Amino acid sequence: MSALGMHLGRDRSSVEETLGHIVHARVVERIWELDHTVWKPEPGEIGNRLGWLRIPEVMQGRIMGLSDFAGEVRAAGYTHALLLGMGGSSLAADVLRRTFGTAQGFLDLSVLDSTDPAVVSDYAERLDPATTLFIVSTKSGTTAETLSFFKYFFTRQAHALGHEKTGEHFIAITDPGTSLEAMAADLSFREVFSGEPAIGGRYSALSVFGLVPAALVGMDTAAMVRHSLSMAISCRVSGEGQIRRNPGAQLGAALGTLARKGKDKLTFLLSPQIESFGDWVEQLIAESTGKGGKGILPVVGEAPGDVSMYGHDRVFVSMALQGDTTHDAALARLKDAGHPVIRITLDDLPDLGAQFFLWEFATCVAGHVLNINPFDQPDVESAKVHSRKAMDEFRRQGRLPRQEPVLSEQGISVFGDTKAQTLHDALTGFLSGALAGSYVALQAFVKPDSWSDEALGRLRLMIGRRYGLATTVGYGPRFLHSTGQLHKGDAGNGLFLQITCDDREDLAIPDEAGSDVSSMSFGVLKQAQAQGDRDALLAAGRHILRLHISNRDLASAFGMLAQALA
């Protein structure tokens, strides 16, 4: 099973003190007793959110059924699957597909979690309607983006295959009693997999939301569940002299204690084979801890730099497969420089099952240390409210609310509270306002692809080197379901660079599945979500600068942004 080592330097005594409190207050025992008072006096959004603790045991009894279903769809001739989902309903499946690939003869799985019309169009053109299975994945059954994807692809399938055959190409993963469950029955879906209502989305990796897609790609789900069950048993250990054998309690105590001391930038260095795990753990930590003026910022995908570029607000986590030394030299330098370093070694790839559980348990322990509820997301709704207002205006006026730029330079318009006359002055002036403990979040409402990854990676590296700040990158609207809660709920140390662009193509979203009537497009939905998040950040007193790219290719525009930052 995974090995955990912590090099905490001068912070060790503080973490030891926290572990002593955890033993004295019976925190571990009370978590397993489903005692909501570990976090808050009232049970709201806690008492009904602890089902993940026993999900490894529950799923042991469902593995055979998932395997049988995978065999059924293979026998029916399906070769590809497209998962339609957002946040906790899609991230674990994406991690597992990118980590394990597709076994011979099983379904090649892709995950759609972007409302960018070019991304939706790419999948529509690439996938064969006759051999593709669509997975509609949403716990609530009401996620706007997921239902928009569903209505688009159901209508497209109906045109290609006929309405009477379309339902058999769809399955749903949702909680019992949702509107999606009822819709699936009405439209004759091939199957509906019921989730556990007592599990929140970001804690659902080891439930059907992660394991149904895993079975479809031919992964050894039984092995992953066994690893997760072993970790769950380890996370039960408690008592004086025993607590150090509980990796979840140790890790959670360290994360919470270090964050209280201002070391709240949790920076991940991952083995290349498990790099995608960062996307899942980012949502878990950010959405669970970023509230009430507190928060732990997960920093994933940031290229390792010179030790001198890191502030005193960093904690480094290495997750490495046995024998991988990719980041060993960098970790040694960080340790020598006095930064806290946490090292986790995985025995093999199925050991990711243990990591899902370990980080869920540790995050909940950290929530206790920080005195927050790790299961709610009180600020997520604010962006949705502002987005709905923008879409309502579109339906009334035929256009989204207008915003006037402060300046425009060669196809890049700047929106925000700045008196700058040039793009260079706007960017450098905005970033120069960073204080100790600040971070920069690049929020890109552009097509997510390898080229955009590289371009945004170059920008964040330039910012990190020049200003010594932690940086994150999120594609919109995906990040709204992961780091969006922390952006509005933490101590307000974020500087937000929102990057939007004109869409070169657009796609209509049917008002109903199977209908050709449409009052909204994916391009409008994406723009409304960008506006809604900007308005929500401003309402929360955050600092945001919007850069809109129009009438030019993204490559030259990103080149201009890099030049302006130089």
Image (spheres, helix red, strand yellow):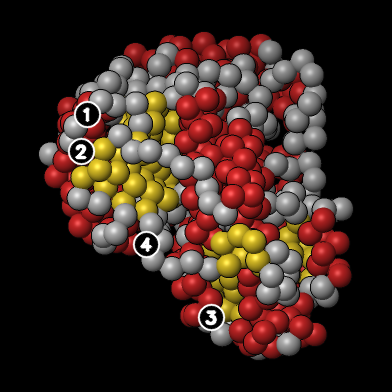
The residue lying at 49 percent from left, 50 percent from top is 527
Q: Looking at the image, do the residues carrying marks 4 and 2 touch, with CB atoms under 8 Å apart?
A: no
Q: Earlier along the polypeptide chain: callout 2 or callout 3?
A: 3
The residue lying at 66 percent from left, 24 percent from top is 373
The residue carrying mark 3 is 127
Name the amino acid type tagged 3: Leu
The residue lying at 54 percent from left, 14 percent from top is 18
Q: Looking at the image, do the residues carrying marks 2 and 1 touch, with CB atoms under 8 Å apart?
A: yes
Residue 7 seen in render: no
How far is mark 4 from mark 3, CA to CA?
Answer: 18 Å
Q: Is residue 279 left or right of residue 394?
A: left
Q: Is residue 148 left or right of residue 191?
A: left
The residue lying at 81 percent from left, 67 percent from top is 184
The residue carrying mark 4 is 449
Q: Is residue 457 left or right of residue 519?
A: left
**Where residue 516 appears, x then y in whole percent?**
68, 74
The residue carrying mark 2 is 423
How far is mark 1 from mark 4, CA to CA?
Answer: 32 Å
**Where residue 395 appears, x then y in whole percent?**
63, 52
Q: Looking at the image, do the residues carrying marks 1 and 4 touch, with CB atoms under 8 Å apart?
A: no
Name the amino acid type tagged 2: Leu
At label 1, counting other C-alpha atoms closer than 10 Å, the crowd grade (few under 14, some 14-19, many 20 or more) is some
Between circles 4 and 2, the one closer to the viewer is: 2
Residue 387: mark: none
How far is mark 4 from mark 2, CA to CA?
Answer: 25 Å
Name the amino acid type tagged 1: Ala
